[in-house]
Amino acid sequence: MSHKNPRQKSKTISVFLITTVILLGLFFRLSNLSNKVFWVDEVATAVRVSGYTITQVTDDLLQQGVVDRKTLLSYQTINSDRTFGDSLDALTKSPEHAPLYFLLTRLWMQWWGNSVGIMRSFSIVFSLLCLPCIYWLCQELFKRSQISWLAVGIMSISPFYVAYAQEARPYSLWTVTILLMGVSFWRAIRLNNKSAWSFYSFCLILGFYTSLFSSYIAFFQGIYLLLNFTKQRALIIKNYLISSSISVLAFYLGSG
């Protein structure tokens, strides 16, 4: 009769626990997804994704007077009257939000459908992508799988991340880009080669197109490098400045 050694037994238990926690997190994210209140910020998402601005909707409704439910929903669903270009134009006229999430959601809904559950499910996809990203970031920072898996477990069942995973808002995508900005930053410092800094620049661009607040993260990453400046890190700082400048330029040209 064979017996597992303590280390192998401990590993088996750990795999079982983390798998259970991740599945529990997935269950929480999918629970009651379509039946929760579709609140005002999600309505704003639906309007922009459908190719309208809030001003256009307000003006139309004021002109029509009393409207029925079907008319209201027509501004929150994708139809043949409004194209992908209309969604892009609506986002250009509403610059308070970066466009990436809304345009991707438009494509997602064109493929899968117009329901509230479908719209919210896109955030679940990004919420699940956060898990490998947080693992990767912890590996870059600590290089200990125990810490990385613990972070994955916490993020899986955190009420904060579960709540955002069930909203048709950019927060889950932004979390992915924040984690990738962190991963690529520490990876670029460690490797300090062209491909690593190119990846960092790409992650910054994703972050900027997801939320303008991502610029603060890039800024404070630069502050960190300056506060820890040494002659040996001069090339790293130079590469950081080049990569971040390229990212800012790419965002400026794309949003201009």
Image (tube, rainbow, N blue to C red):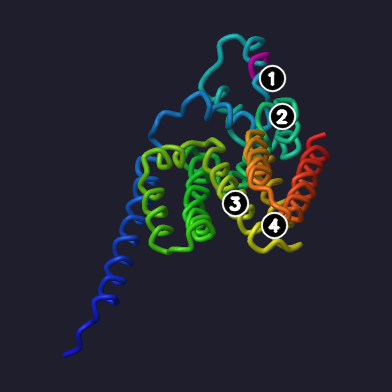
Q: Which label number is shown at residue 199?
A: 4
Q: Position of residue 126 (x, y in %)?
A: 52, 48
Q: Gap between marks 2 and 4, in whole Å? A: 30 Å
Q: Amino acid at mark 4?
A: Phe
Looking at the picture, tell me which residue is in the foreground, 51 or 68.
51
Q: Tell me whether circle 1 and circle 2 mark residues in contact (CB < 8 Å).
A: yes
Q: Which label number is shown at residue 90?
A: 2
Q: Gap between marks 4 and 3, in whole Å? A: 9 Å
- Mark closer to the chain start, 2 or 4: 2
- Mark closer to the chain start, 1 or 4: 1
Few, some or many residues within 10 Å of mark 2 (<14, 14–19, 20+): many
Magenta part of the chain: 55-59
Q: Gap between marks 3 and 2, in whole Å? A: 28 Å
Few, some or many residues within 10 Å of mark 1 (<14, 14–19, 20+): few
Q: Which residue is mark 3?
A: 180
Determine whether the residue tagged by mark 1 lies in a helix, strand or loop. helix
Q: Tell me whether circle 1 and circle 4 mark residues in contact (CB < 8 Å).
A: no
Q: Position of residue 240 (x, y in %)?
A: 73, 50
- Mark closer to the chain start, 3 or 2: 2
Numbered label tally: 4
Left or right: 255 as drawn, with respect to 143: right
Q: Amino acid at mark 1?
A: Gln
Q: Is residue 100 visible?
A: no
Q: Which residue is mark 1?
A: 56
Q: Is 124 within the magenta?
A: no
Q: Which label number is shown at residue 93?
A: none
Q: Position of residue 150 (x, y in %)?
A: 37, 55
The N terminus - image quarter? bottom left
